Image: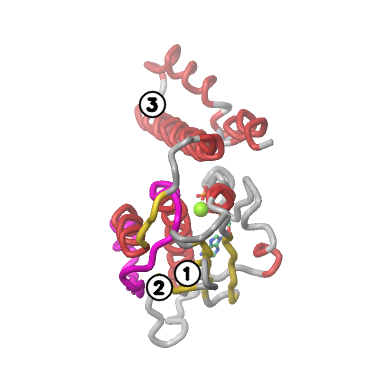
């Protein structure tokens, strides 16, 4: 179902103002010399952004298709998993000034594919960062300091679940998720970002990857105050 939507989606990613990626590129090729340099530069920037977005969609969709790999699952230690995901996201996280608190005990491990689990965490951490940025912007826009001492914060914690599961939770104190949105966040292509900015595939891919682990991913949120995404994963000694 997702694959059939993709060509349409890539088309939609091109803003109507540019008249379509190919037409615009063709116009620059044939009339480029007659157009003001600023206009050409602006349009080329648009084209680069749209191509990047199209590449994102294709990457995300590939993740859906990768589930026929024969690589066996292995024991994945959560401390290392979290470190890997944080190292992949830390540059952008740092720019928000967010405090990142990690509370993951050594020795907690699950059964899985490390790269897929890291991908899930990167998706969730990226959304958390964006939620912090939105809350920061809201505060800025209304010119109010907001709740006294609000400090952007992400907390990653892990623990034992039932006998054969571990839990891994990522909390943020970003803008939170309204009730009507909460019901839809895992839908493919659902996004609250402005048109053309998000693929809306992040959490759909995350859920798909977690399903492959026979695990679960759930969300709780307090609108305006923050959200928590919780993964439940089988332990290394779990029986399928
Ligand atoms: N931590 C969060 N805080 C607030 N809203 C969130 C959070 N995580 C997800 N959401 C909401 O869920 C929606 C879907 O998230 P998802 O990652 O699937 O797509 P996206 O972030 O909109 O787009 P993309 O991941 O392609 O950039 C987001 O648009 C946002 O409204
Ligand atoms: Mg996302």
Secondary-structure class at tag 3: loop
The image shows residue 155 at horizontal and vertical percentages of: 40, 73
Q: Which residue is mark 3?
A: 36
Image marks 2 and 1: residues in contact by CB distance under 8 Å: yes
Taking the spot 40% from the left edge, 34% from the top edge, the residue there is: 45
Q: Quadrant of the N terminus?
A: top right
Question: Could you tell me if residue 130 is visible in this image?
Answer: no
The quarter of the rendered structure image containing the C terminus is bottom right
Q: Earlier in the sequence, mark 2 or mark 3?
A: 3
Task: Give, as a single range, the part of the protein colored magenta.
Answer: 89-116
As drawn, 152 above or below 134: below
The residue lying at 56 percent from left, 46 percent from top is 201
Label 2 or label 3, whichever lies nearer to me, is 2
Gap between marks 2 and 3, in whole Å? 49 Å
Residue lying at 46% horizontally and 71% vertically, measured from the top left: 172
Task: Please tell me which of labels 3 and 1 falls first in the chain.
Answer: 3
Residue 99 belongs to the span the image colors magenta: yes
125 to 152, vertically: above or below: above
Asked whether residue 209 appears in the rendered view, the answer is: yes
Local secondary structure at mark 1: strand
Which residue is the site of mark 1?
169
The numbered mark, 2 or 1, whose residue comes first in the sequence reads 2
- Which residue lies at the image location 48% right of the left edge and 71% below the top edge? 174
Q: Looking at the image, which is closer to me, 32 or 163?
A: 163
Q: Quadrant of ligand 1?
A: bottom right
The residue singled out by tag 2 in the image is 155
Inter-mark Cα distance, 3 to 1? 51 Å
Q: Is residue 107 left or right of residue 4?
A: left
**Marks 3 and 2: in contact by CB < 8 Å?**
no
Is label 2 or label 1 in front?
1
């Amino acid at each position: 179902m997702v694959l059939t939507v993709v060509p349409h989606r890539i088309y939609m990613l091109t803003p109507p103002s540019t008249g379509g990626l190919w037409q615009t590129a063709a116009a620059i090729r044939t009339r480029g010399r007659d157009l003001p340099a600023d206009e050409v530069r602006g349009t080329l920037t648009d084209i680069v952004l749209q191509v990047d977005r199209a590449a994102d969609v294709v990457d995300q969709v590939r993740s859906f298709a990768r589930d026929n790999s024969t690589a066996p699952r292995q024991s994945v230690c959560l401390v290392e998993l979290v470190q890997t995901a944080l190292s992949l996201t830390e540059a952008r996280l740092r720019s928000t000034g967010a405090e990142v608190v990690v509370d993951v005990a050594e020795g907690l491990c699950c059964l899985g594919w490390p790269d897929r689990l890291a991908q899930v965490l990167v998706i969730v951490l990226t959304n958390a960062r964006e939620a912090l940025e939105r809350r920061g912007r809201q505060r800025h826009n209304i010119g109010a300091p907001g709740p006294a001492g609000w400090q952007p914060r992400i907390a990653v914690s892990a623990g034992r679940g039932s006998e054969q599961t571990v839990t891994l939770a990522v909390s943020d104190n970003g803008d939170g998720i309204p009730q009507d949105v909460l019901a839809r966040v895992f839908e493919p292509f659902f996004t609250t970002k402005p048109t053309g900015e998000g693929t809306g595939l992040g959490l759909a891919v995350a859920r798909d990857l977690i399903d492959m682990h026979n695990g679960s991913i759930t969300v709780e949120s307090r609108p305006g105050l923050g959200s928590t995404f919780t993964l439940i994963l089988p332990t290394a000694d779990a029986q399928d």
